[in-house]
Amino acid sequence: MTARDAASHAGEAAALRLDELTLDQLNDDLLTLSRKYGCTAPSEVFQEANNLLQQVQVNLERTRAPEQHTRLYYAAAQASALLAAVSFDLGALTPAVSFARSAAQYGKTIDNGPVQAYAYGMLAFMAFWDGRPSESVRLAKAGQQFGGLGDTARRRLYAIEARAHGHLRADDQAQRAIRSALEQTGGQRDELHDDIGGEFGFDAARTAMSNATTCLLLRDPTGAEEFASAALALLSSQPQDEVPIVVSGPAAIDLARARLMRDEVEGAQEALTPVFQVPPGWRGSGMMERLVAARIELTRPQFRGSPAALSLAEQIEDFSALSPARRLGAQSPLAIEA
């Protein structure tokens, strides 16, 4: 009887196995979504990522094969990470943090260092947006300790750490982290950040954009303009329909704010011209908070009575009113600390 029971159980276990093509399709769908993230409206990304996460969760109940569980948990981590990113773009910080933690837990389940590092980077990013820059530094440094990370993963974590130091007005530490981000050129790779890439990637343009924001936090308009201009120059070499708005928009706004710090209203208007053409559905939190900071710059005494400054301020207010985050009633305590 024991032998027959064992044979029966083994047969049932063998039957509870997914077709590999199902897993391949899930992987392909996640790769496609990650790579088109920056050129897709946030609401559409959320719906697709949520559908993929639900598929993964259902399929986890349909297989007993350990190697398939590993692939599915990896897919769940990717879907949760994308949901964290897009929830933040939509101005929903609480669910964004929850999704990021889920991604970290899925990564821990399968002992995948790059997935956990990405999730910790997201949590660090959200911590300084939530007014906790010291916690952000801790999370970014913790993310750097995971194994199996390539240069891109480390570059991203150092850039996030630099931003956190910027919120603390810790100039030396921020500059050190910026240099560390730029020094990640050893040729090391990992699957998530490099082979899948897309939203999980962190190329030179995105690094420059992030560094520009850090310089603004340190009240360094010269450094900010240099980094923002470098980011936009790198993006200009890409086909127009492949330029990620989540990078080009913030970089252009940072460039405008750097110019406002030097009282150059016309230069700021020029930098913001392409931003004002971004459709409402694409106006994520990162863009909106940078615009709030630029609007605050326009309240300085030297701009009072300036028709150009008043016109630009009104354009910013009209543009911001139609963003998804504003329409959903989201409130941020940050506003990129003007």
Image: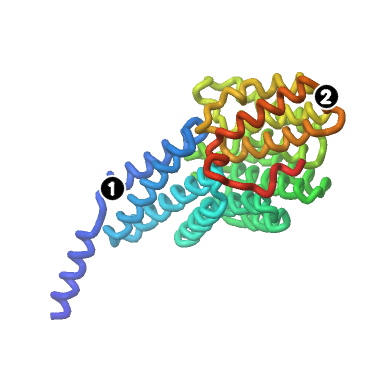
Q: Which residue is drawn at the image coordinates 71% and 32% (left, top)?
A: 254
Give left or right: position of 207 versus 66: right
In this view, the mark in front (2 or 1):
2
How crowded is the residue under tag 1: few (<14 C-alpha within 10 Å), some, or many (20+)?
A: few
Residue type at mark 2 is Gly
Q: Which residue is drawn at 65% across and 56% down?
A: 139
Image location of residue 3, percent across then percent down: 16, 77
* Residue 202, above or below 116: above
- Looking at the image, residue 27 lies above or below residue 17: above
- Image point (77%, 40%), residue name: 338
* Residue 86 x/y as whole percent: 51, 43
The kind of residue tagged 1 is: Glu
Q: State which quadrant residue 307 falls in.
A: top right
Which residue position is annotated with label 2? Answer: 305
Q: How crowded is mark 2: few (under 14 residues within 10 Å), some or many (20 or more)?
A: few
Residue at 56% from the left image edge and 35% from the top image edge? 323
Viewer-side residue, 58 vs 203: 58
Total marks shown come to 2
Towards the viewer: 277 or 2: 277
SS at mark 2 in the image? loop
- Residue sitting farthest toward the front: 305
Q: In this view, does 189 lie above or below 227?
A: below
For residue 159, what is the image quadrant? top right
**Mark-to-mark CA distance, 2 and 1:** 67 Å
Q: At which x and y percent is residue 335? A: 69, 43
Which residue in the structure is indicated by mark 1? Answer: 20
Please state if 59 lies on the left or on the right of 319 as rendered.
left
Give coordinates of residue 90: x percent, y percent. 53, 42
Residue 33 versus residue 296: which sits nearer the camera?
296
> Residue 319, which numbered label?
none
Looking at the image, is mark 2 or mark 1 earlier in the sequence? 1
